[in-house]
Image (cartoon, helix red, strand yellow):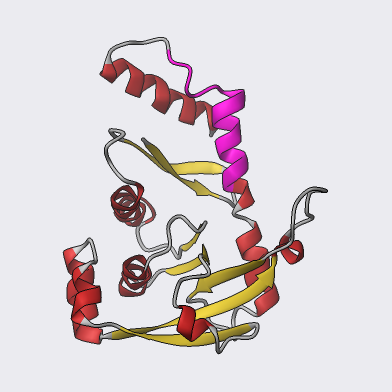
Amino acid sequence: RISGFLDVCNGIYIDVLIKSYKDSEIPMAYEQMNNIHDILEKQKVIYIGDRNYPSTDIFIYYNMKGDKFCYRGKPNFYKKQLENIERDGWIEIDLDDRWIDRFKIEEVKDYAREHRNFRLRVIKVMKSELRQLKVSEKDEEIIIFTNLDENEWPTKEVLQLYGNRWSAETGYDILKNKIEMERVTSEKAELILQELHSQVIVHN
Protein backbone atom coordinates (compact mmCIF):
# COMPACT_ATOMS: atom_id res chain seq x y z
CA ARG A 1 0.00 0.00 0.00
CA ILE A 2 1.33 3.43 -0.97
CA SER A 3 0.38 6.72 0.64
CA GLY A 4 1.72 10.13 -0.32
CA PHE A 5 1.47 13.73 0.86
CA LEU A 6 1.63 16.14 -2.07
CA ASP A 7 2.55 19.82 -1.78
CA VAL A 8 -0.24 21.20 -4.01
CA CYS A 9 1.47 24.61 -4.31
CA ASN A 10 4.72 23.21 -5.72
CA GLY A 11 3.47 19.94 -7.20
CA ILE A 12 5.94 17.71 -5.36
CA TYR A 13 5.59 14.82 -2.95
CA ILE A 14 6.88 15.75 0.50
CA ASP A 15 6.53 12.27 1.95
CA VAL A 16 5.70 8.85 0.53
CA LEU A 17 5.09 5.80 2.69
CA ILE A 18 5.14 2.25 1.30
CA LYS A 19 3.86 -0.58 3.47
CA SER A 20 2.20 -3.98 3.33
CA TYR A 21 -1.23 -4.26 1.72
CA LYS A 22 -2.44 -5.36 5.17
CA ASP A 23 -1.84 -1.89 6.62
CA SER A 24 -4.81 0.48 6.55
CA GLU A 25 -4.80 4.05 5.28
CA ILE A 26 -5.62 5.87 8.52
CA PRO A 27 -2.67 4.60 10.64
CA MET A 28 -0.42 5.34 7.67
CA ALA A 29 -1.83 8.87 7.52
CA TYR A 30 -1.00 9.39 11.21
CA GLU A 31 2.56 8.19 10.64
CA GLN A 32 2.97 10.52 7.69
CA MET A 33 1.53 13.52 9.52
CA ASN A 34 4.19 13.00 12.18
CA ASN A 35 6.76 12.80 9.38
CA ILE A 36 5.46 16.08 7.93
CA HIS A 37 5.99 17.81 11.27
CA ASP A 38 9.61 16.63 11.29
CA ILE A 39 10.20 17.59 7.65
CA LEU A 40 8.58 21.03 7.71
CA GLU A 41 9.47 21.73 11.34
CA LYS A 42 7.49 24.81 12.46
CA GLN A 43 6.11 25.89 9.08
CA LYS A 44 2.37 26.43 8.81
CA VAL A 45 0.49 23.60 7.10
CA ILE A 46 -3.05 23.19 5.77
CA TYR A 47 -4.01 19.57 5.10
CA ILE A 48 -6.47 18.98 2.25
CA GLY A 49 -8.11 15.62 1.67
CA ASP A 50 -11.06 13.69 0.32
CA ARG A 51 -13.88 11.91 2.10
CA ASN A 52 -11.97 8.67 2.73
CA TYR A 53 -9.86 10.26 5.46
CA PRO A 54 -11.97 12.50 7.73
CA SER A 55 -12.63 11.19 11.22
CA THR A 56 -13.21 12.83 14.58
CA ASP A 57 -9.87 11.65 15.95
CA ILE A 58 -7.97 13.05 12.96
CA PHE A 59 -9.70 16.42 13.39
CA ILE A 60 -8.77 16.41 17.08
CA TYR A 61 -5.19 15.46 16.17
CA TYR A 62 -4.94 18.53 13.94
CA ASN A 63 -6.31 20.81 16.65
CA MET A 64 -3.94 19.27 19.17
CA LYS A 65 -0.94 19.92 16.89
CA GLY A 66 -2.10 23.41 15.93
CA ASP A 67 -2.56 22.44 12.27
CA LYS A 68 -5.27 23.57 9.86
CA PHE A 69 -7.30 21.27 7.63
CA CYS A 70 -9.89 21.28 4.86
CA TYR A 71 -11.56 17.94 4.11
CA ARG A 72 -14.53 16.74 2.18
CA GLY A 73 -16.85 14.83 4.50
CA LYS A 74 -19.52 12.21 4.14
CA PRO A 75 -23.15 13.37 4.56
CA ASN A 76 -23.71 10.99 7.49
CA PHE A 77 -20.98 12.68 9.56
CA TYR A 78 -22.46 14.68 12.47
CA LYS A 79 -25.85 14.41 10.78
CA LYS A 80 -27.85 15.99 13.60
CA GLN A 81 -25.53 18.99 13.93
CA LEU A 82 -25.41 19.52 10.16
CA GLU A 83 -29.16 20.11 10.04
CA ASN A 84 -28.59 23.56 11.55
CA ILE A 85 -26.11 24.65 8.87
CA GLU A 86 -27.48 26.23 5.69
CA ARG A 87 -24.26 27.29 3.97
CA ASP A 88 -21.34 28.06 6.29
CA GLY A 89 -21.22 27.79 10.07
CA TRP A 90 -19.74 26.13 13.13
CA ILE A 91 -20.94 23.05 14.97
CA GLU A 92 -19.87 21.76 18.37
CA ILE A 93 -19.23 18.07 18.93
CA ASP A 94 -19.49 16.56 22.42
CA LEU A 95 -17.36 13.48 23.07
CA ASP A 96 -18.29 10.66 25.43
CA ASP A 97 -16.05 7.84 26.68
CA ARG A 98 -17.45 5.27 24.25
CA TRP A 99 -16.62 7.51 21.31
CA ILE A 100 -13.16 8.38 22.60
CA ASP A 101 -12.31 4.71 23.22
CA ARG A 102 -12.63 4.09 19.47
CA PHE A 103 -9.86 6.56 18.64
CA LYS A 104 -6.69 4.93 17.31
CA ILE A 105 -3.96 7.08 18.88
CA GLU A 106 -3.43 7.24 22.64
CA GLU A 107 -2.33 10.88 22.73
CA VAL A 108 -5.52 11.83 20.87
CA LYS A 109 -7.58 9.87 23.39
CA ASP A 110 -5.88 11.70 26.27
CA TYR A 111 -6.46 15.08 24.64
CA ALA A 112 -10.12 14.27 23.94
CA ARG A 113 -10.74 13.11 27.53
CA GLU A 114 -9.31 16.38 28.79
CA HIS A 115 -11.29 18.67 26.46
CA ARG A 116 -14.46 16.60 25.85
CA ASN A 117 -15.64 18.63 22.85
CA PHE A 118 -14.40 20.46 19.79
CA ARG A 119 -15.70 22.95 17.24
CA LEU A 120 -15.83 22.27 13.53
CA ARG A 121 -16.62 24.60 10.66
CA VAL A 122 -18.99 23.20 8.04
CA ILE A 123 -19.46 24.49 4.49
CA LYS A 124 -22.15 23.10 2.19
CA VAL A 125 -21.64 23.59 -1.53
CA MET A 126 -22.85 22.07 -4.79
CA LYS A 127 -20.23 20.21 -6.80
CA SER A 128 -20.95 22.46 -9.80
CA GLU A 129 -19.66 25.41 -7.75
CA LEU A 130 -16.27 23.73 -7.44
CA ARG A 131 -15.73 22.54 -10.98
CA GLN A 132 -17.45 22.01 -14.31
CA LEU A 133 -19.46 18.80 -14.38
CA LYS A 134 -19.10 16.17 -17.07
CA VAL A 135 -22.06 15.68 -19.40
CA SER A 136 -23.20 12.49 -17.68
CA GLU A 137 -22.37 13.70 -14.16
CA LYS A 138 -25.09 14.64 -11.69
CA ASP A 139 -24.77 17.62 -9.41
CA GLU A 140 -24.64 16.87 -5.69
CA GLU A 141 -24.10 18.59 -2.37
CA ILE A 142 -20.57 18.46 -1.01
CA ILE A 143 -19.82 18.98 2.66
CA ILE A 144 -16.48 20.46 3.66
CA PHE A 145 -15.09 20.24 7.20
CA THR A 146 -12.42 22.70 8.28
CA ASN A 147 -11.02 24.56 11.28
CA LEU A 148 -10.02 27.64 9.27
CA ASP A 149 -11.21 30.89 10.84
CA GLU A 150 -14.04 32.53 8.88
CA ASN A 151 -12.53 36.00 9.35
CA GLU A 152 -9.28 34.97 7.67
CA TRP A 153 -10.83 32.46 5.29
CA PRO A 154 -14.21 33.50 3.80
CA THR A 155 -16.37 30.80 2.22
CA LYS A 156 -15.17 31.54 -1.31
CA GLU A 157 -11.51 31.22 -0.37
CA VAL A 158 -12.06 27.92 1.44
CA LEU A 159 -13.74 26.54 -1.69
CA GLN A 160 -10.80 27.70 -3.81
CA LEU A 161 -8.44 26.07 -1.34
CA TYR A 162 -10.30 22.77 -1.46
CA GLY A 163 -10.21 22.92 -5.25
CA ASN A 164 -6.44 22.46 -5.00
CA ARG A 165 -7.12 18.87 -3.97
CA TRP A 166 -7.42 17.99 -7.65
CA SER A 167 -3.66 18.61 -7.90
CA ALA A 168 -3.21 15.48 -5.79
CA GLU A 169 -5.30 13.52 -8.29
CA THR A 170 -3.12 14.86 -11.10
CA GLY A 171 0.05 13.92 -9.21
CA TYR A 172 -1.22 10.39 -8.71
CA ASP A 173 -2.21 10.14 -12.38
CA ILE A 174 1.31 11.13 -13.42
CA LEU A 175 2.85 8.49 -11.14
CA LYS A 176 0.49 5.74 -12.23
CA ASN A 177 0.01 6.36 -15.95
CA LYS A 178 2.93 8.46 -17.21
CA ILE A 179 5.75 7.22 -15.00
CA GLU A 180 4.03 3.80 -14.67
CA MET A 181 4.86 3.41 -11.01
CA GLU A 182 3.15 0.03 -10.75
CA ARG A 183 5.40 -1.47 -13.43
CA VAL A 184 8.47 -2.76 -11.60
CA THR A 185 11.24 -4.96 -12.95
CA SER A 186 12.59 -6.32 -9.67
CA GLU A 187 11.39 -9.30 -7.65
CA LYS A 188 13.15 -8.64 -4.35
CA ALA A 189 11.28 -6.42 -1.89
CA GLU A 190 14.24 -4.12 -1.24
CA LEU A 191 14.80 -3.50 -4.95
CA ILE A 192 11.09 -2.91 -5.54
CA LEU A 193 11.09 -0.26 -2.81
CA GLN A 194 14.10 1.40 -4.44
CA GLU A 195 12.30 1.46 -7.79
CA LEU A 196 9.15 2.96 -6.29
CA HIS A 197 11.05 5.66 -4.41
CA SER A 198 13.10 6.52 -7.50
CA GLN A 199 9.88 7.00 -9.49
CA VAL A 200 8.65 9.50 -6.90
CA ILE A 201 11.95 11.37 -7.27
CA VAL A 202 11.45 11.41 -11.06
CA HIS A 203 7.96 12.85 -10.52
CA ASN A 204 9.32 15.64 -8.33
The picture places residue 180, in percent across and down from the top left corner, at 54, 22
Where residue 124 sits, quadrant-wise, is bottom right
The picture places residue 12, in percent across and down from the top left corner, at 53, 41
* Residue appearing at x 45%, y 65% in the figure: 44
* Residue appearing at x 25%, y 75% in the figure: 99
- Is residue 111 visible in the rendered image? The answer is no
Majority secondary structure in the magenta region: helix
- Between residue 199 and residue 49, name the one nearer to us: 49
The picture places residue 183, in percent across and down from the top left corner, at 48, 17
Q: Is residue 182 magenta?
A: yes
* Residue appearing at x 47%, y 86% in the figure: 91
Q: Is residue 14 above or below residue 147?
A: above
Relative to 34, is 86 on the left or the right?
Answer: right
- Between residue 183 and residue 101, name the one nearer to us: 101
- Between residue 61 and residue 197, name the one nearer to us: 61
Q: Which residues are magenta?
A: 168-184
- The N terminus: image quadrant: top left
Q: Is residue 111 magenta?
A: no
Relative to 193, is 181 on the left or the right?
Answer: right
Relative to 196, is 128 on the left or the right?
Answer: right
